Image (cartoon, rainbow, N blue to C red):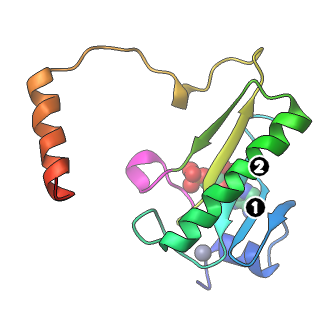
Amino acid sequence: MDDCIFCKIVKGEVPSFKVYEDDRVYAFADINPISEGHTLIIPKAHAENLGEISDEDLVAIHRVSKKMYHAMQKTLGAGGIALVQANGRAVNQVVMHYHLHLIPRKDSQPRLAATQWDLVPGDMDTIKAVSAKIAAALGH
Ligand code: AMP
Ligand code: ZN
Protein backbone atom coordinates (compact mmCIF):
# COMPACT_ATOMS: atom_id res chain seq x y z
CA MET A 1 0.00 0.00 0.00
CA ASP A 2 1.51 3.29 -1.13
CA ASP A 3 0.62 5.43 1.89
CA CYS A 4 1.26 2.77 4.56
CA ILE A 5 4.18 3.63 6.87
CA PHE A 6 4.99 -0.04 7.59
CA CYS A 7 4.97 -0.93 3.86
CA LYS A 8 7.44 1.93 3.44
CA ILE A 9 9.61 0.47 6.21
CA VAL A 10 9.57 -2.93 4.48
CA LYS A 11 10.64 -1.26 1.19
CA GLY A 12 13.38 0.74 2.96
CA GLU A 13 11.73 4.07 2.10
CA VAL A 14 11.38 4.89 5.81
CA PRO A 15 14.31 4.02 8.11
CA SER A 16 13.97 1.43 10.86
CA PHE A 17 16.11 -0.44 13.35
CA LYS A 18 15.86 -3.92 11.82
CA VAL A 19 15.93 -6.85 14.21
CA TYR A 20 14.98 -9.72 11.86
CA GLU A 21 13.96 -10.37 8.25
CA ASP A 22 13.00 -13.34 6.09
CA ASP A 23 10.95 -13.73 2.90
CA ARG A 24 7.61 -13.16 4.67
CA VAL A 25 8.41 -11.28 7.85
CA TYR A 26 10.13 -8.08 8.97
CA ALA A 27 10.82 -7.11 12.60
CA PHE A 28 12.03 -3.76 13.89
CA ALA A 29 12.24 -1.62 17.01
CA ASP A 30 9.20 0.41 18.03
CA ILE A 31 10.33 4.05 18.13
CA ASN A 32 8.02 4.82 21.06
CA PRO A 33 9.08 1.90 23.25
CA ILE A 34 7.06 1.26 26.38
CA SER A 35 9.99 -0.77 27.64
CA GLU A 36 13.53 -1.54 26.52
CA GLY A 37 13.50 -3.91 23.55
CA HIS A 38 9.90 -3.19 22.45
CA THR A 39 9.80 -4.75 18.97
CA LEU A 40 7.21 -5.05 16.19
CA ILE A 41 6.89 -8.07 13.89
CA ILE A 42 5.00 -7.48 10.66
CA PRO A 43 4.16 -9.33 7.45
CA LYS A 44 5.92 -7.92 4.38
CA ALA A 45 2.65 -8.24 2.45
CA HIS A 46 0.21 -5.52 3.47
CA ALA A 47 -2.74 -6.79 5.53
CA GLU A 48 -4.69 -4.51 7.81
CA ASN A 49 -5.56 -6.91 10.60
CA LEU A 50 -6.06 -10.47 11.82
CA GLY A 51 -9.03 -10.86 9.49
CA GLU A 52 -6.97 -10.01 6.42
CA ILE A 53 -3.55 -11.57 7.05
CA SER A 54 -2.85 -14.88 5.27
CA ASP A 55 -2.55 -18.01 7.41
CA GLU A 56 0.99 -18.48 6.08
CA ASP A 57 2.08 -15.01 7.19
CA LEU A 58 0.36 -15.42 10.55
CA VAL A 59 2.21 -18.68 11.20
CA ALA A 60 5.49 -17.13 10.03
CA ILE A 61 5.08 -14.19 12.42
CA HIS A 62 4.36 -16.42 15.39
CA ARG A 63 7.33 -18.66 14.59
CA VAL A 64 9.51 -15.54 14.62
CA SER A 65 7.91 -14.38 17.88
CA LYS A 66 9.19 -17.57 19.51
CA LYS A 67 12.75 -16.99 18.25
CA MET A 68 12.49 -13.42 19.47
CA TYR A 69 11.23 -14.57 22.87
CA HIS A 70 14.40 -16.60 23.39
CA ALA A 71 16.64 -13.82 22.06
CA MET A 72 15.04 -11.26 24.37
CA GLN A 73 15.27 -13.50 27.40
CA LYS A 74 18.93 -14.13 26.68
CA THR A 75 19.92 -10.53 26.02
CA LEU A 76 17.57 -8.44 28.13
CA GLY A 77 16.97 -10.66 31.13
CA ALA A 78 13.25 -10.10 30.76
CA GLY A 79 11.08 -11.36 33.58
CA GLY A 80 8.16 -11.52 31.15
CA ILE A 81 7.36 -10.78 27.51
CA ALA A 82 3.88 -9.64 26.46
CA LEU A 83 2.58 -10.17 22.93
CA VAL A 84 0.03 -7.51 22.10
CA GLN A 85 -1.80 -7.22 18.80
CA ALA A 86 -4.58 -4.72 18.17
CA ASN A 87 -7.25 -5.07 15.49
CA GLY A 88 -9.33 -1.97 14.86
CA ARG A 89 -9.59 1.53 16.21
CA ALA A 90 -11.81 0.44 19.13
CA VAL A 91 -8.75 -1.28 20.61
CA ASN A 92 -6.34 1.51 19.67
CA GLN A 93 -4.87 0.12 16.47
CA VAL A 94 -3.14 3.22 15.10
CA VAL A 95 -1.08 1.82 12.21
CA MET A 96 -3.40 -0.10 9.92
CA HIS A 97 -0.84 -2.73 8.85
CA TYR A 98 -0.92 -5.91 10.97
CA HIS A 99 1.77 -5.87 13.66
CA LEU A 100 2.57 -7.96 16.69
CA HIS A 101 4.13 -6.07 19.60
CA LEU A 102 6.73 -7.91 21.69
CA ILE A 103 7.08 -6.10 24.97
CA PRO A 104 9.74 -7.39 27.36
CA ARG A 105 9.43 -6.34 31.01
CA LYS A 106 11.73 -6.76 33.95
CA ASP A 107 10.41 -8.08 37.28
CA SER A 108 11.28 -4.73 38.84
CA GLN A 109 9.06 -2.75 36.42
CA PRO A 110 5.42 -1.94 37.07
CA ARG A 111 3.03 -4.38 35.40
CA LEU A 112 1.75 -3.53 31.94
CA ALA A 113 -1.79 -2.14 32.06
CA ALA A 114 -2.72 -4.30 29.04
CA THR A 115 -1.92 -7.45 31.01
CA GLN A 116 -3.44 -6.48 34.32
CA TRP A 117 -7.09 -6.16 35.19
CA ASP A 118 -9.23 -6.71 38.23
CA LEU A 119 -10.86 -10.13 38.36
CA VAL A 120 -14.52 -9.30 38.75
CA PRO A 121 -16.79 -12.33 38.26
CA GLY A 122 -19.17 -11.86 35.30
CA ASP A 123 -22.81 -12.81 34.93
CA MET A 124 -22.75 -16.54 34.12
CA ASP A 125 -25.91 -16.45 31.96
CA THR A 126 -24.44 -13.67 29.83
CA ILE A 127 -21.07 -15.43 29.57
CA LYS A 128 -22.85 -18.62 28.50
CA ALA A 129 -25.02 -16.86 25.90
CA VAL A 130 -22.16 -14.88 24.34
CA SER A 131 -19.89 -17.96 24.26
CA ALA A 132 -22.66 -19.93 22.55
CA LYS A 133 -23.01 -17.17 19.92
CA ILE A 134 -19.29 -17.26 19.13
CA ALA A 135 -19.26 -21.06 19.10
CA ALA A 136 -22.22 -21.09 16.69
CA ALA A 137 -20.39 -18.69 14.35
CA LEU A 138 -17.45 -21.14 14.46
CA GLY A 139 -19.81 -24.02 13.62
CA HIS A 140 -19.59 -25.68 17.05
P1 AMP B 1 -0.77 0.23 17.48
O1 AMP B 1 -1.29 0.44 16.08
O2 AMP B 1 -1.51 1.04 18.50
O3 AMP B 1 -0.72 -1.22 17.87
O4 AMP B 1 0.71 0.75 17.56
C1 AMP B 1 1.47 1.21 16.50
C2 AMP B 1 2.89 1.24 16.97
O5 AMP B 1 3.72 1.56 15.86
C3 AMP B 1 3.18 2.28 18.05
O6 AMP B 1 3.71 1.61 19.20
C4 AMP B 1 4.19 3.21 17.41
O7 AMP B 1 5.17 3.65 18.31
C5 AMP B 1 4.79 2.33 16.32
N1 AMP B 1 5.32 3.08 15.19
C6 AMP B 1 4.68 3.97 14.43
N2 AMP B 1 5.48 4.44 13.44
C7 AMP B 1 6.68 3.81 13.60
C8 AMP B 1 7.92 3.84 12.91
N3 AMP B 1 8.11 4.65 11.86
N4 AMP B 1 8.92 3.06 13.35
C9 AMP B 1 8.75 2.25 14.43
N5 AMP B 1 7.60 2.17 15.11
C10 AMP B 1 6.57 2.93 14.72
ZN1 ZN C 1 1.19 -1.72 4.79
Q: Would you say residue 90 is visible in this rendering?
A: yes
Mark 1 lies within 8 Å of ligand 1 (Cβ measured): no
The disc placed on residue 27 is 1
- Which residue lies under the disc numbered 2? 68
Cα separation, mark 1 vs mark 2, equals 9 Å
| Residue farthest toward the bottom in the current orientation of the protein | 2
Residue drawn at point x = 75 percent, y = 72 percent: 9
State whether the magenta stretch is mostly helix, strand or loop. loop
- Are circles 1 and 2 on residues that touch, CB within 8 Å? yes
| Residue farthest toward the right in the current orientation of the protein | 75
Determine whether 69 is above or below 26 in the image: above
Image quadrant assignment for residue 34: top right
Residue drawn at point x = 76 percent, y = 34 percent: 35
Mark 2 lies within 8 Å of ligand 1 (Cβ measured): no
Looking at the picture, how far across and down is residue 81, in whole percent? 69, 34
Look at label 2 and name its amino acid. Met
Q: Secondary structure at mark 1?
A: strand
Residue drawn at point x = 79 percent, y = 29 percent: 78
Q: Can you say which quadrant of the picture contains the N terminus?
A: bottom right
- In the drawing, does residue 28 fall left or right of residue 51? right
Q: Which residues are magenta?
A: 86-95
